[in-house]
């Protein structure tokens, strides 16, 4: 079964600094990969997704992620963090495109932004 | 587009009482998912439906939990009897297609407290 590991429970970044959140997945075939963000008291919002093609994908709010098959990683990046980016971030993996699917989520990384 | 609508937003109930959580998916979406989020276990998929039919309920923790989707615009998750360990945030999500390719749209969740 597929699984997702987010090794960092908390990360603190200064406003204006760059950000990288780590995500490693376990899945035999080509995965469908996603990053979601959850603000306090809110549901999860899709930031970006990867299926195939260009390994660097762009998302909303200035985020991007790079798929590296050799490292089984799909790290999320942003060049300059804003205070409004403080939230919890979830990486998720889904199976291929046959049958009925479900997403498996990582445990999340909470991002704190310091002034 | 009103998004995925969940009600109530907050529910406090006494142990042993029946609790019903409600979800209205996005119009046109044919897959619906119920997740539970806790600090200890993160996001857990409880059950998902495709075209109103339950596809996988292996995540439903016990017989006390049941879910229905009588039509394409409404689903319920019921807990009877409720227990303090059921306290969590319950999310409903919907998707356009059975595959994971489109990602999910999440509701704002129902925070359940069982005392």
Image (cartoon, coloured by chain):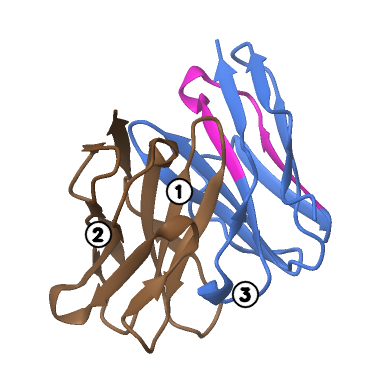
Chain label for disc 3: B
Quadrant into which the N terminus of chain A falls: bottom left
For the C terminus of chain A, the quadrant is: top left
User: Label for residue A37?
Assistant: 1
- Chain assignment, label 2: A
Task: Read off the residue under disc 2.
Answer: A23
**Mark 3 vs mark 1, CA separation in Å:** 22 Å
Chain coloured brown in this rendering: A
Which quadrant of the structure image shows residue B26? bottom right
Q: Residue at x 43, y 45 (%)?
A: B43
Q: Please tell me if label 2 and label 3 are on a single chain.
A: no
Decide: marks 1, 2 in contact (CB < 8 A)? no
Residue at image position (22%, 56%) is A22
Give the magenta part as a residue range.
B74-91
Give percent across and percent down for residue B12. 64, 15
Question: For the point 60% across and 34% down, which residue is it?
Answer: B64
Secondary structure category for the residue under label 1: strand
Q: Measuring 45% from the left and 48% from the top, which residue is drawn there?
A: A37
Q: Is residue A70 something that shows in the picture? A: yes
């Amino acid at each position: 079964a597929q699984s997702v590991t987010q090794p960092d429970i908390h990360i603190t970044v200064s406003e204006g600094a760059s950000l990288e959140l780590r995500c490693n997945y376990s899945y035999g075939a080509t995965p469908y990969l996603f990053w979601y963000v959850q603000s306090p008291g809110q549901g999860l919002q899709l930031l970006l997704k990867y299926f195939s093609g260009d390994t660097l994908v762009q998302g909303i709010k200035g985020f991007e992620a790079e798929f590296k098959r050799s490292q089984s990683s799909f790290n999320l990046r942003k060049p300059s963090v804003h205070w409004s980016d403080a939230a919890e971030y979830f990486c998720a993996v889904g199976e291929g495109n046959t049958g009925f699917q479900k997403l498996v989520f990582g445990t999340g990384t909470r991002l704190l932004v310091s002034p | 587009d009103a998004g995925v609508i969940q009600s109530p937003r907050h529910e406090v109930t006494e142990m042993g009482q029946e609790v019903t959580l409600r979800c209205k998916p996005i119009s046109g979406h044919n897959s619906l998912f119920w997740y539970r989020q806790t600090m200890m276990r993160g996001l857990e998929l409880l059950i998902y439906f495709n075209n109103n039919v339950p596809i996988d309920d292996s995540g439903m923790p016990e017989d006390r939990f049941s879910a229905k989707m009588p039509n394409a615009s409404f689903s319920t998750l019921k807990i009877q009897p409720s227990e303090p360990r059921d306290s969590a945030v319950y999310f409903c999500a919907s998707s356009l297609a059975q595959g994971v390719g489109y990602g999910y749209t999440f509701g704002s969740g129902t925070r359940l407290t069982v005392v």
